[in-house]
Image: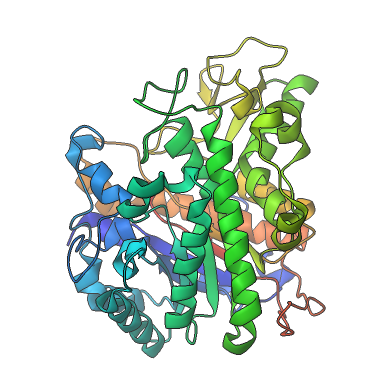
Amino acid sequence: MQVKRLQFLFLSFLLLKNPSLAQSLNDDGQDVKRSHFPDGFIFGTSTSSYQVEGAYIEDGKGLNNWDVFSHIPGNIKNNDNGDIADNHYYRFLEDIELMSSLGTNAYRFSISWARILPRGKFGQVNPRGIMFYNKLIDNLLERGMEPFVTIHHHDIPQELVDRYGGWLSPLMQEDFVYFAETCFKSFGDRIKNWITMNEPNLLVDMSYIRGWYPPAHCSPPFGNCSAGNSDIEPPIAMHNMILGHAKAVKLYREHFQLEQGGYIGIVGFTEYFEPLRDSELDRQAVRRALAFTNAWLFDAVVFGDYPAEMRLYLGSALPTFSLEETCYLKGSLDFIGMNFYTSLYAKDCIHSACISGGDRPIRGFVYTTGERDGEPIGGRCGNPRFFVVPEGMEKIVNYMKERYNNMPMFVTENGFSPPQQNDQVQALLQDTSRVNFHKSYLAALARAIRCSWIFRVELGRQLRMDRWLLPAIWTILCRSPDT
């Protein structure tokens, strides 16, 4: 068994309020126990299809953008690929046993678009792909595990890239709706928690600003790709994904939600920021960084438009929504999904000199860093941009609660990968750094429960499908960022 097969552990859902549960927690998080959390707090696991399934051209699956990208020499470190990955496609029953042995009772996974629709809407539904996910779902339910399904986690059929360039084209919106509809029809009788997309804001950063993900588009100073414009393309791709999400939610609410009784939301990548210097300029930079990182997605789907800070600094480069689009975009989620790993410092680049990149409109004229005067903001991780900053968990929860009027919230990712060490295998077997990370972040979560009343029971919140969402919902996933 590969070591990383067990590195995507830790998903939890908090369904009840209990402000007293954290009273016995030490502030340093060294005494975190399951008993510190209410009965409704559920631990589980999470994956994404390309990262774990393997079987990349088997049983009728088509090629996706990651299959093609990872097979181009030099694109991925060591020329690794997901052809086999963790072999979850063939070992999912064993994986379910592993989850069960850990005492978990929820599993978040994503559906491979090219496994269900090898050619998108230009071909037939692949029955063997449907069969695989049916078996996965049914076996999870038999073991008492609740499936949480992400429809789109960064992988798209290569056919759609070849035909019209993927998310840069508005045509992708209808392709995504067709894919989502296929999923609702095939699995919606058993799936009660849908996530339309995972981290569209991170995807546009990695794919169209930095050029590290397919289609590897970028321009200086962010990179030297063969195609792309890091200032222009990211807002276009993001706009198409947001509208694709909203149209899929509209379809679900109008044709499936009442009968199937599920909930639907979207997951965004979030970070918290602290001012690099004790100055008003850097405090303003923090506000811009939060808008360009977190609110870019969530303002659109909650309020129906992009943040004012983005309108101000991006101008005509930021697309606009029509009145009709705003109508179905506003409130197009039953819950917020939030992936949180780290906090960073933010420095103003409007009135101060900055490293190239931070001085661009697409970054809100903000330079972000994990160090101040050579000292890191927190403990270091395997990812050089991630740091161990537990108090950031409290702060991001409060930020999201206040900005979005205490909407039901899922923290769908939070986790740790250790820095490279000489004896990496032994370090992973001991894994004390990861244990300490989880303790400290869970302690911060417990303090948020105790202090911010974010998790109060929402007896008065009624969804559009005329069913009652009794509690505010909390989810936390601790998946290793290096998998």
**Image quadrant for the N terminus?**
bottom left
Q: Position of residue 255 (x, y in %)?
A: 61, 81
Q: Residue furthest top?
A: 353
- Residue 12: x percent and y percent? 52, 68
Residue sitting at x 18%, y 39%: 79
Residue 267 place in picture, x, y as percent: 56, 57
Is 78 situated left or right of 282 in this image?
Answer: left
In the drawing, does residue 450 fall left or right of residue 66? Answer: right
Q: How is the protein colored in the picture?
A: rainbow
Q: Is residue 440 visible?
A: yes
The quarter of the displayed image where residue 192 is located: bottom right
Depth check: 14 or 391 in front?
Answer: 14
Image label count: 0
Q: Identify whether 370 is placed above or below 418.
A: above
Q: Give residue 29's quadrant in the image.
A: bottom right
- Above or below, comparing residue 377 to residue 264 in the picture: above
Residue 434 is left or right of residue 204, and the answer is left
Residue positioned most to the right: 460
Q: Which picture quadrant has residue 334?
A: bottom right
Task: Residue 391: tell me if it is visible.
Answer: no
Q: Is residue 240 above or below residue 319?
A: below
Residue 53 locus on image (x, y percent): 26, 63
**Front residue of this view, candidates 44 and 305:** 305
- Image side of residue 148 versus residue 305, left or right: left
Residue at 47% across / 50% down in the picture? 437
